[in-house]
Amino acid sequence: MKTNAMLIANAGLAFAVLVLLSGCTSQKASDIYSISGTISYDGKPLPKGNISFAPDASKNNQGPGVTAEITDGKYETPDGKGISGGPYVLTINGYDGVPIASGEGGMDRMGKMMFEAYELKADLPREDATHDIEIPKRK
């Protein structure tokens, strides 16, 4: 006969397994691709910033999203993280790279924002790839 403690332990174990399984996706590591490239603004390499790749849910892309840092006009997704390919929405934030003071004696290494977030849509390949972007200067 099972005791209350055994029932509680079994229920706890079942709950833990359920939580672990619910966090799993159908995406395999082999279906994740790295992406890198260059980003220029007004014809010059973007000094600092970040680029986010969000799957375009309006086109049924359920792949992973990822953000990469931009330094001297170049970006590359972090090791082990990337995209699944297909339709994505890209958002770029650009900064001048000149460190500025930021509250309580700290420094913001990104510097001043150069433009409002720039967004575009792209259909990305299902393989490791490069994707270069030219952001036009806004008047």
Image (cartoon, rainbow, N blue to C red):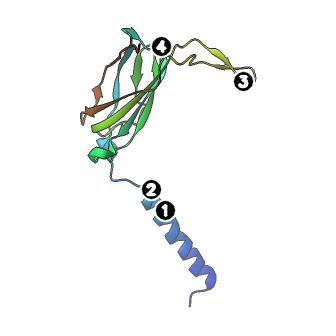
What kind of residue is marked 3?
Answer: Gly
Is label 1 in a helix, a strand or a loop? helix
Q: In screen coordinates, is 27 left or right of 105?
A: left
What kind of residue is marked 2?
Answer: Gly
Percent position (x, y) of residue 118? Answer: 41, 25
Residue 91 higher or lower than 54, as above or below: above
Percent position (x, y) of residue 82? Answer: 37, 36
What kind of residue is marked 4?
Answer: Pro
Residue at 41% x, 13% y is 139
Residue at 44% x, 28% y is 68
Mark 4 vs mark 1, foreground winner is 4
Q: Which residue is mark 2?
A: 23
Mark pair 1, 3: CA separation: 40 Å
Say which mark, if any, is on residue 19. 1
Mark 1 vs mark 3, foreground winner is 3
Residue 96 higher or lower than 93, as above or below: above
Percent position (x, y) of residue 86? Answer: 26, 39
Q: In screen coordinates, is 5 left or right of 38?
A: right
Mark 3 vs mark 4, foreground winner is 3
Mark pair 3, 2: CA separation: 38 Å
Q: In screen coordinates, is 133 left or right of 92?
A: left
